[in-house]
């Protein structure tokens, strides 16, 4: 008898414990659900605040000037492309097309030069041993942390002596000499993570180091090189201080300077022209980002980046 | 053997030339120029410490600009990093659409330096702009963002905090690399989420916090586009950051010597704070596998 009553005690205790555990589990599930909802709410809220200014910008560029400061919504009541048409013409003899072309003329040599020079330098650092290697690599890190503000004035004087003022050269030549330490650093890190078996094999097959670089290393580096080019494209497109210092004739203005010019010269109350040109200014960067965002996110995570 | 030892240097040649021409020599030249009077017309004239003495004794613009710069940096960097870490922490939970959110939060950083965004800021913080329209829904009186010295600096801080994306992506990568079993062990021991965050998450990601701190600080000290476009340094020089002052002295007044002296003061401040961060990091940055602790 005692055995049976004991067994039933144990059984009821077990059932109680089970019920208790279930109840506990339910509470936990509810808590998890509440906190999941809270998380989504925060993310949506923050996301909205983050993106609404941009959405508003696009909407406002199609609004009439009277509506821009009267309507917080982004859908224009009377859509008009007047801002784009008039803004594109600008108050200068040139259209915005000219300014986009100028930006392109800076971006093209700068991006290609960066890709070539940084690949060479990263290959040198990652695969060769040479005198002063430690000091030279230390200098890469030093440049990474060195504020540009301290070298800007002598650089200006140097380019002035070279007769490069009011040309695109000061804007891309330093980068084409592997001057953007961040990219060198990123590529070195990337190369160090790749074993050099393939390169050894290529050597055995009779390739010299240049051929190995071109036919073995560059294909392996391709994803990192795409990140480099994309970032350089973005930064150059957005660069304002460089052109502000070096470019003085309007016919050589890149987009960023042209936009500043249109703020200064557009008559008051012609807001939609400026907003329309702002939209055009950020469009290339946004388009490139959405086409290749994988490379951006990987690039930042791999090297850590400014921005 | 000697040939291959030199081969590495051949690959480095563009870098070495660039380093000399565009960084190392300009760096030293700027130190030299800071001790001279130089307006590009006549050769630099050595004046010793005169520029520095003027800066620290009689130049009230400099004093104002320096204090505004420090205020801006100490306001912007912690706010931005805290916000980036907070969002990265939420994104680190297994959520649906995480990539979508990550992209959305990163977009403002992509456009970061673009002056189109500074232009946008001028519009949305105008007295009749978007921000005041939204505030009006909550019954808040319109704020004079650009007319008031405190508010004006804050709009630039907000602009840079809005671009927390790259700091967030770096934090997120670090959070994802933390071993989940640590949290499970802590939960079994009865630790709350907050306690796990403070005692597990934060210590494990200190290297990344350190990295972000230095990068964001160096960048914040050099802020130019925001104040140049949005507030033009005003009102009452309340957003006249040192880079603006340097730009005006060097490229408007062509007082290259004086501008170099300001640039060097700014550089030394950045250096000093970076060194303090490095030095103190021995006490608070935790590297996995480090036996010292």
Image (cartoon, rainbow, N blue to C red):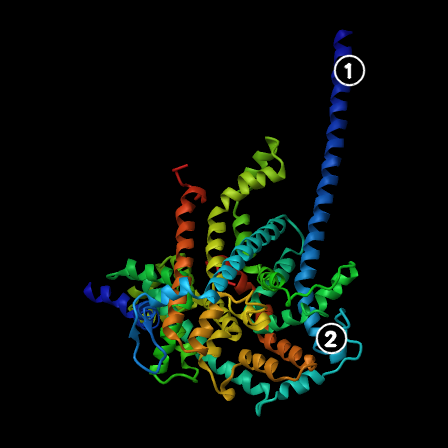
Residue B32 visible, this orientation: yes
Question: Where does label 2 land, which residue?
Answer: A68
B292, above or below B33, in the image: above
The spot of residue A283 in percent (x, y) is 61, 75
A219, above or below B282, in the image: below
**Residue B57: which quarter of the image?**
bottom left
Disc 2 residue crowd, few under 14, some 14–19, many 20+, Cα 10 Å? many
- For numbered disc 1, what is the local secondary structure? helix
Front tag of 1 and 2: 2
The spot of residue A239 in percent (x, y) is 50, 73
The spot of residue A8 in percent (x, y) is 77, 15
The spot of residue B31 in percent (x, y) is 33, 67
A238, above or below A145, in the image: below
Q: Same chain for the residues at labels 1 and 2, yes or no? A: yes
Identify which residue is drawn at 59% across, 77% down: A281
The mark nearer the N terminus, 1 or 2, is 1
Distance from disc 1 to disc 2, alpha carbons, whole Å, reads 78 Å
Which chain does tag 2 point to? A
* Residue B120, label in figure: none
Question: Where does label 1 land, which residue?
Answer: A8
């Amino acid at each position: 008898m005692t055995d049976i009553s004991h067994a039933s005690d144990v059984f009821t205790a077990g059932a109680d414990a089970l019920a208790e555990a279930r109840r506990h589990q339910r509470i936990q599930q509810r808590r998890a659900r509440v906190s999941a909802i809270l998380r989504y709410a925060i993310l949506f809220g923050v996301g909205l605040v983050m993106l609404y200014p941009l959405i508003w910008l696009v909407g406002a560029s199609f609004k009439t000037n009277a509506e821009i400061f009267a309507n917080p919504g982004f859908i224009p009541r009377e859509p008009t492309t007047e801002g784009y048409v008039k803004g594109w013409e600008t108050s200068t003899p040139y259209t915005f097309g000219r300014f986009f072309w100028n930006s392109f003329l800076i971006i093209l040599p700068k991006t290609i030069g960066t890709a070539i020079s940084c690949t060479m330098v990263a290959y040198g650092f990652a695969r060769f041993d040479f005198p002063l290697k430690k000091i030279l690599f230390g200098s890469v890190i030093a440049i990474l942390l060195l504020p540009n503000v301290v070298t800007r004035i002598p650089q200006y004087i140097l380019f002035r002596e070279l007769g490069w003022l009011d040309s695109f050269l000061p804007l891309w030549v330093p980068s084409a000499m592997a001057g953007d330490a961040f990219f060198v650093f990123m590529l070195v890190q990337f190369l160090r993570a790749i074993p050099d078996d393939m390169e050894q094999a290529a050597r055995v097959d009779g390739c010299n180091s240049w051929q190995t670089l071109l036919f073995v290393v560059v294909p392996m580096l391709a994803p990192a090189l795409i990140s480099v080019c994309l970032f350089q494209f973005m930064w150059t497109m957005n660069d304002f201080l460089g052109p502000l210092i070096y470019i003085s004739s309007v016919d050589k203005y890149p987009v960023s300077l042209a936009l500043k010019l249109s703020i200064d010269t557009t008559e008051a109350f012609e807001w939609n022209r400026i907003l329309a040109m702002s939209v055009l200014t950020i469009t290339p960067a946004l388009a490139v980002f959405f086409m290749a965002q994988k490379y951006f996110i990987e690039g930042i995570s791999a090297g850590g980046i400014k921005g | 053997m000697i040939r291959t030892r030199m081969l590495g240097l051949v690959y480095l040649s563009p870098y070495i030339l660039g380093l000399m021409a565009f960084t190392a020599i300009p760096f030293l030249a700027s130190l030299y120029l800071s001790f001279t009077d130089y307006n590009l017309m006549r050769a630099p004239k050595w004046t010793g410490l005169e520029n520095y003495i003027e800066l620290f004794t009689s130049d009230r613009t400099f004093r104002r600009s320096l204090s505004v710069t420090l205020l801006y940096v100490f306001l912007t960097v912690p706010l931005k990093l805290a916000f980036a870490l907070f969002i990265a922490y939420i994104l680190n939970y297994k959520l649906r659409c995480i990539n979508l959110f990550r992209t959305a939060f990163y977009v403002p950083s992509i456009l970061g330096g673009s002056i189109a965004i500074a232009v946008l800021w001028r519009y949305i913080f105008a007295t009749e702009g978007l921000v005041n329209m939204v505030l009006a829904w909550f019954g808040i009186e319109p704020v004079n963002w650009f007319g008031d010295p405190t508010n004006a600096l804050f709009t630039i801080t907000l602009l840079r905090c809005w671009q927390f994306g790259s700091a967030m992506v770096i934090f997120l990568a670090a959070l994802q690399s933390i071993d989940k079993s640590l949290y499970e062990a802590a939960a079994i021991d009865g630790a709350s989420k907050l306690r796990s965050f403070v005692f597990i998450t934060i210590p494990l990601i200190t290297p990344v916090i350190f990295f972000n701190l230095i990068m964001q600080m160096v960048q914040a000290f050099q802020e130019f586009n925001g104040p140049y476009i949005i507030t033009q340094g005003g009102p009452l020089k309340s957003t006249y950051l040192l880079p603006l002052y340097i730009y005006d002295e060097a490229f408007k007044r062509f007082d290259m010597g004086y501008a170099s002296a300001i640039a060097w003061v700014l550089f030394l401040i950045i250096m000093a704070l970076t060194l303090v961060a490095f030095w103190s990091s021995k006490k608070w940055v935790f590297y996995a596998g480090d036996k010292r602790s």
